Image: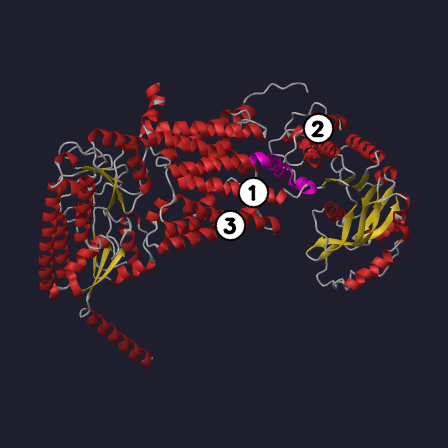
Amino acid sequence: MPEACLTFEDLTLGYNSHPTVHHLNGTIAAGSLTAVVGANGSGKSTLMKGIVGVLKPMSGQCRVADGKRIAYLPQQSELDRSFPARVVDLVSLGLWPRRGLLGRYTRDDREAVSHALMAVGLEGFEKRAIDTLSGGQLQRALFARVLVQDADLILLDEPFNAVDAKTIGDLIALIKRWHGESRTVMVVAHDLELVRANFPDTLLLARRPVAWGRTADTLRAENLLRARRFDEAWHDDAPWCAPDDGHEHAHAHDHDGHHHHEHGEIRDRPDHESGPRPA
Amino acid sequence: MHRLIALASVLTVITLTSTAAISAQPLKVVASFSIIGDFAKNVGGDRIELTTLVGPDGDAHVYEPSPADAVTMSKADVVLVNGLQYEGFLQRLVDASATKASIVELTNGIDPLDMAVGHEHEGNGAAVNHHQGGLDPHAFQSVANAKVYVGNIAGAFCAADAAGCDVYKANAERYTAELGAAEAYIEASVEAIPADQRTIITSHDAFGYFENAYGLTFLAPEGISTEAEASAADVAALIRQVREEKASAIFVENITNPRLIEQIAAETGVTVGGTLYSDALSKAGGPAPTYIDMMKNNIGTIRGAILGS
Amino acid sequence: MYDLLIAPFVEFGFMQRALAGSLLLALGACPVGVFLMLRRMSLTGDAMAHAILPGAAAGFLLYGLQIVPMTIGGLVAGIIVALGAGAVSRFTVQREDASMAAFYLISLALGVLIVSLRGSSVDLMQVLFGTVLALNDDALTLIALISGVTLLTLAVFWRALVAECLDPLFLRSVSRLGTPVHFIFLGLVVLNLVGGFQALGTLLSVGLMMLPAAAARFWTARVEPMCMLAFAFGAVSCVAGLLISYHGSLPSGPAIILSAGTIYAASIFFGTRGIFNTKLRHHRHRTA
């Protein structure tokens, strides 16, 4: 049984006391390649932010195994494209985990950067200003930065948005390469065909996890239907989620031996969080 | 209806009565700044109720009037101002308060000097630069002019309060005599300074009338208003002039940037003498709480710095 | 030529001091200005000029015209405003421009209140802000110290500062330095501005911070050269401005700033990324 890279313990994430990810339990095995799917607002990006630590949990916790380095490619990057930087400067940011604030960049580091640029097909773009890149080129550059980061856990939030088919193919190849190097990869994606074709595992989110396990099992029609029924809106009159309630959930989610595959067995339970809805 | 008419007539009576009562009250006098306030106090004595807008150590060139000033102004019987555009804030305040009081410009009857431009006082002061176009408003820096101010104040008070005219005239006469004594003191003090040491520097050239009357030369690094900023050429020219003409002392004034003065003193080796009061009196406990004190203090400071150094 | 360019600085000590002071200020303030501009905080300098008033005034009222208490007072007021505004924008939904406006207005009102306790507002304003022509030893030491601290801090935090500007979310995902580095940077801004106000006056210190930076933006697409170019522009402006002030009998602060303004205007048109090169010139283009 592979060791856990990531463990969710009753994790609830959200904004303004409204949960966006509700009582999530389970593990991501080291070396796994997991797609995170779900409707808009189902908590996919929030989960990513929670894992990387940009968003603090409202309750529960998300534990990353010791010594695992995280690389995170956000969906809406706060990248300032008007900042005077070249492609090589942007990609070199990925050296931070290795060199930190003051460490000098060695010749190896510079080679790692140019290898990464080569790997994403941006050879010769080193000196280009980032404000002259197309959307797809920028996405490739950001992938190169992830490459340079040399992380154990890689989180990609909708990396295939507004990217052409060839670029998607190249990026998928990179993701598979990472998978082959036994890195743990989680990718938020919308294209279910893409997910079925390339991702062994899938987490289907609808605020709470609807299904989680082998992609083929998770993306069955009844699971997708259930995920679609989820109510995206926040209700100000929704009852408070009592701590006990959470515990009950924890038990309901419980599974023996941390086999993440068993998450697919999540049963349909009365949806306690939706409460009485306004007419 | 009857009640309303009755009420209205009662109100009218009250109003009339109160108007009549005013004439028995002290004359309400507003003085624009501290020096004029001092003159008015000496002439009016306790027959007037005096309000001074810009108090001790304040700068009347760029004073920002408050609403309370407008209220004071609107209730005044006589408003005493320097004139020659000394009080930049005045016209706005007069308009805002819609005062009925007579505005008396005390510089009426003096012989105004052109605005002195720093260091162009060669010869008999005829080297006048007209590019600023105005007249020097600091007429009170000569005691002879102060006597004219006092005469104007007495005239204004007589016009507004005929009953007290004799008192005002007597007060003015007594105070003019005091001014005469102060003037003699100043002239004697200047006499004590050797003729070739009568050049000094101060940060504000408000002393045009002073030098004209008493034969001292004042050099200044800044223009006539405290709002002007010095240029490198001004400072350089002044340092050269101090070196060439052997100025004897430098004075920090009470209301301008003292850093510039210190810099010039450091560069020329001339010592910094003390504080001269040009546009305002000091507070009650200070060295220049009255006009006569101010003039005596200034000449005393100048003489001490020159002869002491 | 010698009379025109060199002689004024040889003959007069105050010209040497003015040159040394303004160059030292440019050394620290120009790179800080580059980052201020890149963070879209170009107007912060102006706001800070008002924000430091209560501190500097309190220092003056308590200790008189001494540069150390006034600078410390100004620093405290400036840091409270900068950090307060920064904290509100970091930890709430409000953007930095709005919180900065709120904080500096409160501070300015407090400053006017304190100044009014002394009776007249004008004399104190004159005293609170220095002029480049009157730099004493204390003021020169202060400026030298500030530019030293600024350069050292920039060197140490350079990588974090660039990362924080370029991709703040990335920096947060790999390091906890994001928020501290923002505050350290705001501290540098306050330090340079307050020191400049005390020694050289508001116009000069804000202008010398922002104008060369804005001009340098038109010439290069990298941060390091941009900072160096900004300093070069700043230095040229100082020398030119002082000479213009000397020969043309013009106030020194405005002369220096207008020199920088001229460089800025020229850069808008003729910079490698300026109008002439990017918009007007009929470009030949390559096949790929």
Q: Are marks 2 and 1 on the same chain?
A: no
Q: Amino acid at mark 3?
A: Ile
In the depicted view, which residue is nearer to us: A134 or B171? B171
Task: Please tell me in which quadrant of the rendered image residue B166 appears.
Answer: bottom left
Give me the C-alpha separation between circle 2 and circle 1: 28 Å
Label placed on residue C184: 1
In the depicted view, which residue is nearer to us: B236 or B21? B236
Mark 3: which secondary structure? helix
Mark 2: which secondary structure? helix
The first of marks 1 and 3 along the sequence is 3
Task: Please tell me in which quadrant of the rendered image residue C134 appears.
Answer: top left
Tell me if C22 is positioned left or right of C101 in this view: left
Can you name the residue that lies furthest to the front here?
B308
Mark 1: which secondary structure? helix
Q: Position of residue A220 (x, y in %)?
A: 90, 47
| Residue that carries the numbered disc 2 in the rendered image | A109
Specify the segment rendered in magenta: C154-174
| Residue that carries the numbered disc 3 in the rendered image | C80
Residue found 51% across the figure and 51% down from its top: C102
In the depicted view, which residue is nearer to us: A36 or C265? A36
Residue found 84% across the figure and 52% down from its top: A210
Q: Position of residue B95 (x, y in %)?
A: 28, 54
Q: Position of residue A122 (x, y in %)?
A: 72, 26
Give me the C-alpha separation between circle 1 and circle 3: 13 Å
